[in-house]
Image: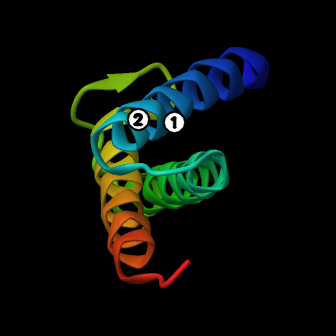
Amino acid sequence: MILPLLLIGGLLATLYAGVAHALWGKSLRGLFGFILASWVGFWLGHWAGVQLGWGWLAMGNLYIVPATLGALALLYGAAWLEKTSTR
């Protein structure tokens, strides 16, 4: 059951990164930064949800709400970094 968890989680995290890039992105390099930030935030949020027992809207073993909040937090940070970069 780990493969569906990874596939759905990876798709959601990549979708969040694409939306963030469409809203705040400037370059292809920024897209890769958003993807990295989204994946790290998503899986850290999922891990935190598992540890704290926050199972609202869980899809099987995937804790979607905490994972989404983690992805959004890191995506916001990545957007802020991209906005303040001088390149």
Residue on which the image places disc 2: 16
Is label 1 in a helix, a strand or a loop?
Answer: helix
In the image, 39 versus 85, the foreground residue is 85
Above or below residue 12? Residue 66 is below
Q: Residue furthest left?
A: 56
Specify the quadrant that holds the C terminus: bottom right
* Classed neighbour count for the residue bearing mark 2: other residues with Cα under 10 Å, few (<14), some (14–19), many (≥20): many
Residue 83 is left or right of residue 18, and the answer is left
Q: Which residue lies furthest to the front in this view?
A: 87
Above or below residue 14? Residue 73 is below
Across and down, in percent, residue 68 comes to 34, 43
Residue 13 tag number = 1
Specify the quadrant that holds the N terminus: top right
Residue 36 is left or right of residue 15, and the answer is right
Amino acid type assigned to the residue bearing label 2 in the image: Tyr
Amino acid type assigned to the residue bearing label 1 in the image: Ala
Q: Do the residues labelled 1 and 2 touch (CB within 8 Å)?
A: yes
Across and down, in percent, residue 3 comes to 78, 19
Residue 44 is left or right of residue 71, and the answer is right
- What residue is at 67 percent from the left and 54 percent from the top? 29
- What residue is at 31 percent from the left and 53 percent from the top? 72
Across and down, in percent, residue 85 comes to 47, 82
Is label 2 in a helix, a strand or a loop?
Answer: helix
- What residue is at 43 percent from the left and 57 percent from the top? 45
- What residue is at 41 percent from the left and 35 percent from the top? 16
Residue 2 is left or right of residue 78, and the answer is right
In the image, 56 versus 10, the foreground residue is 10
Above or below residue 42? Residue 6 is above
Q: Label 1 to label 2, Cα distance in Å?
A: 5 Å
